[in-house]
Image (cartoon, coloured by chain):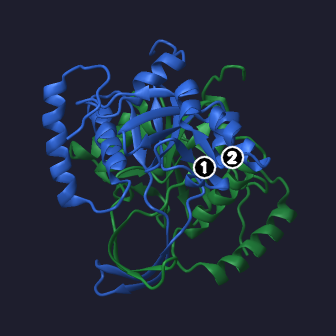
Chain colours: A green, B blue
Amino acid sequence: MDLHYPNGKKYVQMETVKKKATFAKNISYSNRGMTLESDLNETNVYYLEQGIAVIHKKPTPVQIVQVDYKSRSTAVIREAYFKQPSTTDYNGVYRGRYIDFEAKETQNATSFPLQNFHAHQIEHMKRIVDQNGICFVILRFAKTEEIFLLESQYLFIFWDRMILGGRKSIKKEEIEEVGHKILLGMQPRIDYINIINSLYQFEETE
Amino acid sequence: MDLHYPNGKKYVQMETVKKKATFAKNISYSNRGMTLESDLNETNVYYLEQGIAVIHKKPTPVQIVQVDYKSRSTAVIREAYFKQPSTTDYNGVYRGRYIDFEAKETQNATSFPLQNFHAHQIEHMKRIVDQNGICFVILRFAKTEEIFLLESQYLFIFWDRMILGGRKSIKKEEIEEVGHKILLGMQPRIDYINIINSLYQFEETE
């Protein structure tokens, strides 16, 4: 198994964890994209249990059309459709500040396709920034297992470049230049709050 | 129709609006509780469009069991179940600060039953307060059409009183004493941000 941990830390333990995680994933998940999602969910559970931050993934938006009420307490949804999300998937609070982000991954090796985002989501993110919220995306390159945090103001630049007729993806070098690499850890798995600490100043807790 | 607007402002216009709203509701909604929800949704759309705040209702959490993929693009959910929410329904950002609330209504005239909330939601709200987030509930007495904002720290007091064997509801007088009455308006319908402005200090926008 060809593992890449450029920092070289805890290589043996990580490999063990990685194997376990891969095994568990083979059982539980078939969808592409579930590695990132489950790692983020684990991270958010860790933040929650440690009292570090309260961040949740929003439920998948569903348009419910038909519901069977078998009994007074049991309702079965019999017809429903997936709706396109108009916001991002994750939000919550860290030291009083509003946190909002989307997480996506690509099988591409050299660039990140912007089609992973919808115009509505970009619009939402711009509104969050206008409200002085902390907004970013977490981008994963599946092949190399590299994860980056990219602040949304940079995403807007690449998005607007596309709208103006430019390339439909962000070059990996561009992400490396303006984004922040997050090394996979044990606990938490994807420590994005650590990056947020380095980017923002927080008032002392009251 | 017996309308109560203790402030006496814009009585005529309000009555007109009220009739229109009631008419629209009779067409669109059958569920109890939809008046408050639709008024809050209208309010949040107003805040969004005016650039005042970005607050959304979270999607209803659903456990999806079976999905039919008719074609590559069309997926129909054929079996799903409602899940009990572990967080509150509404959250978002106002001037950088995290906002989180739940909205409930009662047909009771003299008290608000605490069974409208789940233990998980109370736990969630306590975590939000620990993270210095702004957390509250919006309570509506349907019969008198009165709406109150109650900061979550007061809800915790009444909740803990119940846990310790006390009454299972909050007396209306108690809500009047520690809560903040919100008068129904035109635009926005339920101006809770106005109350938040009076309760919290905000830094000047950068």
The residue furthest top is B204
Point out the tag, 1 or 2, that comes first from the N-terminus: 1
Question: In terms of depth relative to the viewer, which is nearer, A129 or B59?
Answer: B59
Q: Where residue B88 sits: x, y (%)?
A: 54, 49
Q: Residue at x 68, y 44 (%)?
A: B159
SS of the residue under disc 1: helix
Question: In terms of depth relative to the viewer, which is nearer, B16 or B94?
Answer: B16
Residue B164's place in the image compared with B206, above or below, is: below
Q: Which mark is residue B114?
A: 1
Neighbour tally class for label 2: few under 14, some 14-19, many 20 plus, Cα within 10 Å:
some
Q: Where residue B13 sits: x, y (%)?
A: 14, 28
Figure quadrant of the N terminus of chain A: bottom right
Q: Residue at x 73, y 40 (%)?
A: A52
Residue A40's place in the image compared with A25, above or below, is: above
Q: Is residue B33 left or right of residue B11?
A: right
Figure quadrant of the C terminus of chain A: top right
Residue A81's place in the image compared with B125, above or below, is: below
Q: Where residue B58 sits: x, y (%)?
A: 45, 53
| Amino acid type, residue under disc 2 in the picture | Arg
Question: In terms of depth relative to the viewer, which is nearer, A185 or B197?
Answer: B197
Q: Is residue B202 left or right of residue A118?
A: right
Q: Which mark is residue B167?
A: 2
Chain to which the residue tagged by mark 2 belongs? B
Chain to which the residue tagged by mark 1 belongs? B
| Amino acid type, residue under disc 1 in the picture | Leu
Res. A182 in view: no
